[in-house]
Amino acid sequence: DKGRTADAMNYLLALDQGTTSSRAIVFDRRGTVVASAQQEIRQLYPRPGWVEHDPQEIFESQLATARLALGRANLAARDIAAIGIANQRETTLLWDRRTGAAVANAIGWQDRRTAEACARLKEQGHEAFVHERTGLVLDAYFSGPKLAWLLDQAPALRARAERGELAFGTVDSWLLWRLTGGSVHATDVSNASRTLLFNLRSRAWDEELLTLLNVPRAVLPTVLPSVADFGSTRPEWFGAPIAIRGMAGDQQAALFGHGCHRPGLAKNTYGTGCFLLLATGTELHFSRHGLLTTAAAQVSAVPAYALEGSVFIGGAVVQWLRDGLGCIRRADEVEALAASVPDTGGVYFVPAFAGLGAPYWDPYARGGLLGLTRGTTVAHVARAALEAIAFQSADVLLAMQADGDVPLSELRVDGGAAANDLLMQIQADLLGIPVIRPRVLETTALGAAFLAGLGAGVWASLEDVEALWRAERIFDPALARGTLEERLARWRMAVQRVREWEGQIAPMR
């Protein structure tokens, strides 16, 4: 087996560690799914606005699904050319370098506990400086403030961090550390660019940002391109070592999986949240309308950038209909329920459960159902929920178009909710451009596989992987312009009703 080459190793193993589940998918060199496995992970809510994960559960679930996917494909470690990792991004972990044990629960990307700390930095006048260095806004969404919060919980933790005894990472770094037995502490540029600690121009950790957020450099991982030698798995995990050659944050991996390498190509992922990314090439473009500038997956020393708009609550609104309201038993029932009525009956649903993301960036907004009448039914609410996903994504895309740097003629989509035909048609209607759904909806995992395959020599060029992307269905817009403008105006009126909801109530006299 030592003589086996990358040409003989025809398969890639993609690890896709998400907010609500860990998935592993085996792809062949044509980009076709061979086998997959998925396992849900818990989200923990110790206090209002706090969201956590068990770090050990993240790793064990990801390892279990990887083993299960290999078993279902009837493949061994020697058949895998390389592993690619895609991950929920800003979720923050801190662990002991000697034992490999986490010192606290992972703080999820949706967690809002650092909102006040970010607000103080804004009040002190730091927002423009941070935006200029990072392309981001000062918001609790990002991992740097979460890391600072963890270190501030105990003087001993901060002292240990400064001595280099602790390691920080987002989920990619945590999985890499555990899979390599603690031999590699690294991240890629796409994940590093989501920390508020990374300088997009120099593509390195920024000393002034570290000082501002009070984060010691000793805890930080090495930053590598998204295609790189990230080491190999310990033999005991899969029976033999497997090279890890690709790594990217889930949204950048999905952009890559869609073949969106040229400026002007965009994708939207409909997962727990919605994430719309527009490739801008090798040049930095800073938004004037509340969007983020982020590093895209980088395959060489040449930088790659994208504009991004993040919607905090996307598919999670369907989970709320199921688990919170009990209107449906399974998430896939929502399409039929919503389609049972021709419209929402004037109902607008703003699912700002964890505040509003782009382009509003309002951590104090809260969800609202507006326009209710005695005739409102659960079907109207279900349809309003689907429309809310599409309206939020339309807000982001219209902000991208308002920036005016790169025109957009189509939107490529992926994620679980992209399988919903009604939602995709609503989205096309609200955007006024075609929405294109690919044959492989697991585009995040596919992007991780493409990155790993490029690193392992399975594919020779970007053109090779771009040629593997195939459309399954195109949804063309069918809404009159006047109707579209009226509906967008009503939606924005509903959004204004829920803005800055927390803290609005004055004491009664």
Image (cartoon, grey):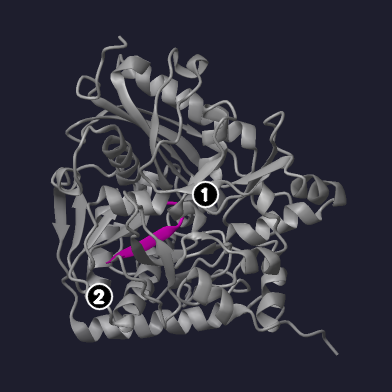
Q: Quadrant of the N terminus?
A: top left
Residue kind at label 1, given as amino acid type? Gly
**From the viewer's perspective, is residue 355 above or below residue 468?**
below
Q: Is residue 492 above or below residue 170?
A: below
Task: Give the residue pinned by disc 1.
Answer: 326
* Secondary-structure class at tag 2: loop
Name the front one of labels 1 and 2. 2
Q: What separation in Å lies between label 1 and label 2 (alpha carbons)?
A: 42 Å
Task: Name which residue lies at 40% across and 48% down.
Answer: 225
Per the image, label 1 sits on a secondary structure element best described as: loop
What stretch of residues is rendered in magenta? 271-280
In the displayed structure, would residue 400 be above or below residue 3?
Answer: below
User: In the rendered view, would you say 281 is above or below 319?
Assistant: below
The amino acid marked with disc number 2 is Val
Residue at screen point 86% across, 47% down: 156
Residue 182 lies, in percent from the top left, at: 60, 30
Residue at image position (23%, 71%) is: 429
Q: Which residue bears the numbered disc 2?
A: 406
Asked if the magenta segment contains residue 345, the reply would be no
Quick check: is 279 in the magenta stretch?
yes
